[in-house]
Image (spheres, rainbow, N blue to C red):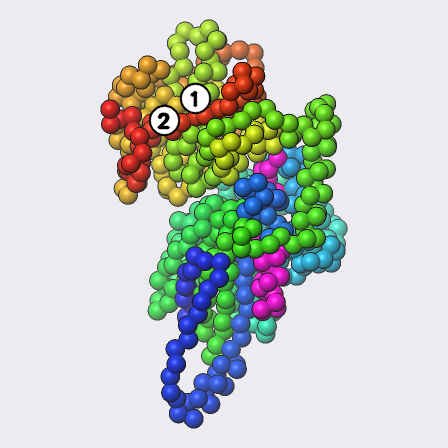
Amino acid sequence: MVQKTWLKLTLLASVLTLGACSTLTGENTGSQNRAEQQKRQFTILAVNDIYNIEGTDAGKSGGMARLRTLREQLSTDNENVLLLHAGDFLFPSSMSTQYKGEQMIDLMNQLDGEASGFDDRLYVTFGNHEFDKSAKKYGPMLAKRIEESDFYWLGSNVTLDKNASNSSAGFNKSLLSNAVTTINGVKVGLFSITTDMAIPEYAAIDNNYLAVARKNISALKEQGAEVIIALTHLRISEDAELLRQLGENGPDVIFGGHEHNRQHICVDVGNAKSCVIKADADIRSAAVAKVTVSASGEVDISHRYSIVEDSTIASDDAVAKRTQHWIKRYEKEYCDKHQQEPSCLLKVIGKTDVDLIAEELEIRRYETNLGAGIADIMVSAFDDIKLERKVQIALINSGSLRLNQNIPAGSELNNWYINGIFQYPVSIRLIEMSGIQLKQTIAHSIEDWTGNGWWLQSSGLAFRHDVKNNSFSELSLIDKSGNITPVKDEDVIVAAVSDYIADPSNGDQDGYTMLNLDKEIVYGEALIDLKTTVTNVIKAQWAKGEAISPGLPGRVCSSDRASLPCVLNK
């Protein structure tokens, strides 16, 4: 990358630009005017990790209808708008369990304001959740979603086999290895890199990310690309390392996904900088970048974040109507399938007297009352089961709790909320683990502390989390009487653990490779389903005329929240 690239960050829905005044000679003014006239500009609108077509916070934040409005607003100011999606959209969501991502493709097809017709300014890449249905038999399903797409998919390091491919014109038009498109006279090259954390049976994913980048950048330059954009679904640390290793030969900018919180990192490359930019999941925010190519070919990139909520951006009527179509269809078909009355998803099953904290930047970084409360239910689920030893702790990866919005105090609870929390089936495994294993488990929980799904919600244990140094101390067990006992390496602990992180056959276990089923405790003919168990607890409270009101137990004591209760301070 020989061009100069710079980035400016603004965390506002709009930006105020102040121009400096100066006095120039006529000759300089004319020269400057000619240079200004020769500049070419275009705008990039980038999003990532969108799971819910309707948005979050009861529809008040995000949503495809507001994304359509934002795109239209930017197009009004500058018709040269490129829309990018950095992966994770087919799964998971409540609707995807029914429609396998069809609803998301349908809404994405509406983002150009047309119900039909190909959108040649929208590019997406594969996230790991595009491969949630990983068995070979699901290859045709993914091929069908690609075929239905009136936009481009980039798969620079993804190779689909014949089970996930077809010969349709739609499929072959939509799926590309890389692309060069011309926007306002600028040749823009795009390629993608997808994480290898989930490899389906019908695809190969090249995990030599550096070689993939070099190969595609070289190919794009040969095609005359003046600006090169990488669209990635990797950890931001992996994105940054790519930029460091590629140096001046890297992309001008990376727009990424995978993490769910807006962030950026810039890396020095020669005399310039290259940056990776990520927005909030579920379109709580979107990255808006202005790309300027000077007459001499230098590339300047500035960006801001647009906060996408009803107070700043209205919903597009047509896309909102289509969203409601899918919501009503899903509700009817769900209730029919489960042989329940119409509107069963909205049937009140309980109430909360307190805010239930489930927004991802909280539940994936801190102990929350919802997460800790669910972990407590995992322990109490075994109260009436005869066991040689009582269950001492519970662990569940926060990525299994996917509502991504808080439920306000006073809210009535319904199956829509429950389905939103448990978008995957979650069974409870009972295992014995050593004190050493528990220490390794907590060490991984706090690893790369930026809001990742492997952060644990827990019960029956406590520790201090030093956020600045990303370390933990005073790991202890807490019994139901509140007695605190430091964990020793030789301890043998009975743990209720979410199936995904306990069972290696499920995939990458969110990195919990120190856990396994070698010392599983079989407690019945079938595993306990956590969604059903939580639902029954809420219903039982409601049957007594009582709302739930889980407090924050203060078992995970975060150094940046020292004012909150901490059981270790007693």
Q: Is label 1 or label 2 in front? A: 2
Res. 338 in view: yes
147 displayed left or right of 371: right
Residue 89 in magenta stretch: yes
Which residue lies at the image location 70% right of the left edge and 53% below the top edge?
318
| Residue 553 circle label | 2
The percent coordinates of residue 449 (x first, y second) are 37, 41
Q: Earlier in the sequence, mark 1 or mark 2?
A: 1
**Segment colored magenta:** 68-94
Res. 531 in view: no
Which residue is under mark 1?
376
The percent coordinates of residue 153 (x first, y second) are 62, 53
462 displayed left or right of 51: left
Which residue lies at the image location 47% right of the left edge and 45% below the top edge?
260
Which residue lies at the image location 72% right of the left edge and 28% below the top edge?
342
Which residue lies at the image location 41% right of the left edge and 7% below the top edge?
388
Give the number of marks: 2
Q: How far apart in space, not on screen, are marks 1 and 2 (Cα)? A: 10 Å
Nearest the viewer among 272 and 551 is 551
The percent coordinates of residue 378 (x first, y second) are 46, 20
Q: The disc labelled 2 sits on which kind of residue?
A: Pro
- From the viewer's perspective, is residue 70 above or below residue 22? above
The N terminus: image quadrant: bottom left
- From the viewer's perspective, is residue 59 above or below residue 510? below
